[in-house]
Amino acid sequence: MDFKRLSLCMIVKDEEAFISKCLSSIKGIVDEIIIVDTGSSDRTVEICKSFGAQVYEFPWNHSFADARNFGLERATGDWILWMDADEEVDASDAYKLRDILYSEEEILSIHLINYFGEHPEPEKTFDIVHTRLFRNHKGFKFSGKIHEMLNVEEVLTIPEEGLIINHVPIKIHHYGYLDTVNQNKKKFERNLTMLEEELKQKDYSPWTHYHIAAEYYGKEEYSKAFEHVNNSIKDFLTRLQTPPSLLYRLKYSILIATGSIDGAWPGIEKACILYPDYVDLHFYKGLILYLKDMFNEALEAFDHCLEMGEANLQYLTQKGVGSFQALHYKGCCYEKLGMIEEAAACYAMAASQSATFVSPVEALRKMLAKHQDVFSPLTEDCDDKTLIAKALTLN
């Protein structure tokens, strides 16, 4: 068997806070590290070189794709793994990267775990499969000045039923969406400026409006976000393409966040028909029904979420929508219907599945104060573990 080599390709700028952890996660796994630096003024380059990386300077020309392709051209491995500096390969999965080098595939996806909120917590993530591994010298390259994408359809022969990229059980943890990271890097201002420049191009991608919408959504500027996500949907339809699932996920996130429930119903049903295996959309359907006081119908939606689970990573999926969050809202529905014991049991199951999702425990505390006869002999000063254990016995 011929010895196969793996190249890590990255672009960086002022990443001294993250780069050591990133490179440590693949130390001894990859055969070469290709770093393209676009103008760091901190210790990034020094740290990269301490890991044996080949560092190339690339004057920033406002194109992430150009910078990534500059690195690809210098990689000599049989396979390429591309990452960002604010990512780490899971310690229990790193060795699996060597196995894929002998795969017959041309390109492979990994399990990308995106953390959000103030601190990285295992139950505050958005999970999806993401194409990060591909054969070198096959013509793969990036396109798009921002939110760059691989030219997969150009390189591979696409069958009529569509392209299926196989997924390998390798996890990469991404910390770039944490609040502190976004604030420190001023990503909003940079991204919005670049995306607005993209819109000026005659052949701009229909994804451009979506990415602008996502930026405004993150800043809670919902009116602008809604305008742009609708423009993105329109752009895809104009091109006779089915709008991707992410667009509908964002659209209904905005409507729920703004309390525009009449605007969300019954449109969410059409989105669920379009993507019947996307658990997040069914979760939103349940939320919308709950907010419309249609509690029995909402219960059916949340039960369906629990049946679906969160294993389908072909879609961007929020942790909990097929487990503890769905259980919590089942409890809310039962409580509104006056079914106290059923509600308590759902809250308790939700709490037992997540140590950081506090809503079900708070709901149990309120129920304990209002329905002491149901929770007898517990008193309001009992600890959370005892309260949860008692609630689990009620139904």
Image (spheres, helix red, strand yellow):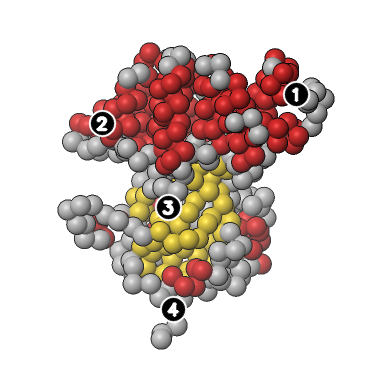
Q: Position of residue 133 (x, y in %)?
A: 42, 62
Instruction: Give neighbour class at mark 2: few <14, some 14-19, many 20+ (Cα, 10 Å).
Output: many
Q: Nearer the viewer, residue 142 or 270?
A: 270
Mark 2 or mark 3, which has the lower sequence index? 3
Q: Position of residue 303 (x, y in %)?
A: 45, 33
Label 4 is placed on what type of residue? Lys
Residue identifier under label 1: 376
Q: CA distance from mark 3 to mark 1?
A: 50 Å
Q: Which mark is residue 4?
A: 4
Q: CA distance from mark 1 to mark 2?
A: 59 Å
Q: CA distance from mark 1 to mark 4?
A: 66 Å
Q: Residue at x 37, y 19 (%)?
A: 264
Dot 1 falls on a residue whose secondary structure is loop
Residue identifier under label 2: 235
Residue identifier under label 3: 130
Label 3 is placed on what type of residue? His
Instruction: Give neighbour class at mark 1: few <14, some 14-19, many 20+ (Cα, 10 Å).
Output: few
Do the residues under discs 1 and 4 have CB atoms within 8 angstroms?
A: no
Q: Is residue 103 left or right of residue 97?
A: left
